């Protein structure tokens, strides 16, 4: 028998969607590292590594980050890769999304 899903109820915390705190708790527990990786022909690639990341929509965050930096990028596992050196821009972007400054480290 299939599990019946309730509309308007969060499946993780069982609270109404308006009162759900899952995403904010998840953002507080994150450790995020932003660093530069060199690719072919010496090109720079900004990499955002989300350690302890479970279930959030990285593709959505990547799409917003690409628009914010006006650059291309992709999602690979628990990392987002953005073309070019955008470390400071990406930190500002993540702060605007609600992540805390203590959890974001730039290398």
Image (cartoon, rainbow, N blue to C red):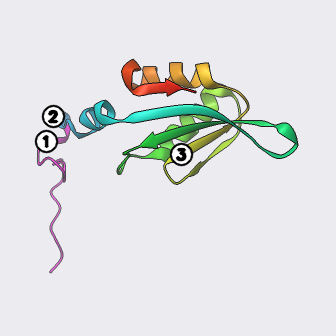
Cα separation, mark 1 vs mark 3, equals 30 Å
- Quadrant location of residue 4? bottom left
Mark 3, other Cα within 10 Å: few <14 / some 14–19 / many ≥20: some
User: Horizontal and vertical percent for residue 91?
Assistant: 52, 22
As drawn, 6 above or below 47: below
Checking the image for residue 67, the label placed there is none
Q: Position of residue 56 (x, y in %)?
A: 38, 46
For discs 1 and 3, the disc positioned in front in the rendered view: 3
Occupied quadrant, residue 73: top right
The part of the chain drawn in magenta is 1-17
Residue hosting label 3: 79
Left or right, residue 83 beside residue 42: left
Looking at the image, is 48 positioned above or below residue 102?
below
In this picture, is 72 found above or below 8?
above
* SS class, disc 1: loop
Using residue 65 as the reference point, say whether residue 83 is left or right of it: right
Which residue, given by chain and number where applicable, does mark 2 sit on? Answer: 19
User: In this figure, which residue is indicated by the disc labeled 1?
Assistant: 16
Tell me how far mark 1 sits from mark 2, CA to CA: 5 Å
- Position of residue 38 in the picture relative to residue 26 (left or right): right
Task: Work out how far the residue at label 2 is from the one at label 3, CA to CA, in angstroms.
Answer: 29 Å
| 4 inside magenta stretch | yes
In the picture provided, is 96 more to the left or to the right than 83? left
Q: Nearer the viewer, residue 68 or 36?
A: 36
Residue 14 inside the magenta-drawn segment: yes
Q: Residue at x 62, y 24 (%)?
A: 87
Question: Residue at 51% across / 40% down in the picture?
Answer: 49
Badge 3 element: strand
Callout 1 touching callout 3 (CB < 8 Å): no
**Residue at x 71%, y 27% (from the top left corner):** 85
């Amino acid at each position: 028998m299939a599990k019946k899903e309730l509309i308007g109820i969060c499946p993780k915390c069982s609270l109404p969607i308006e009162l759900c705190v899952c995403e904010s708790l998840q953002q507080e527990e994150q450790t995020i590292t932003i660093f530069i990786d060199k690719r072919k022909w010496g090109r720079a690639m900004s990499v955002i590594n989300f350690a302890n990341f479970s279930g959030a929509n990285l593709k959505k965050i990547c799409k917003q980050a690409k628009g914010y930096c006006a650059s291309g990028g992709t999602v690979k596992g628990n990392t987002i890769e953005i073309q070019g050196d955008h470390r400071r821009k990406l930190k500002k972007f993540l702060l605007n999304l609600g992540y805390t400054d203590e959890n974001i480290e730039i290398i």
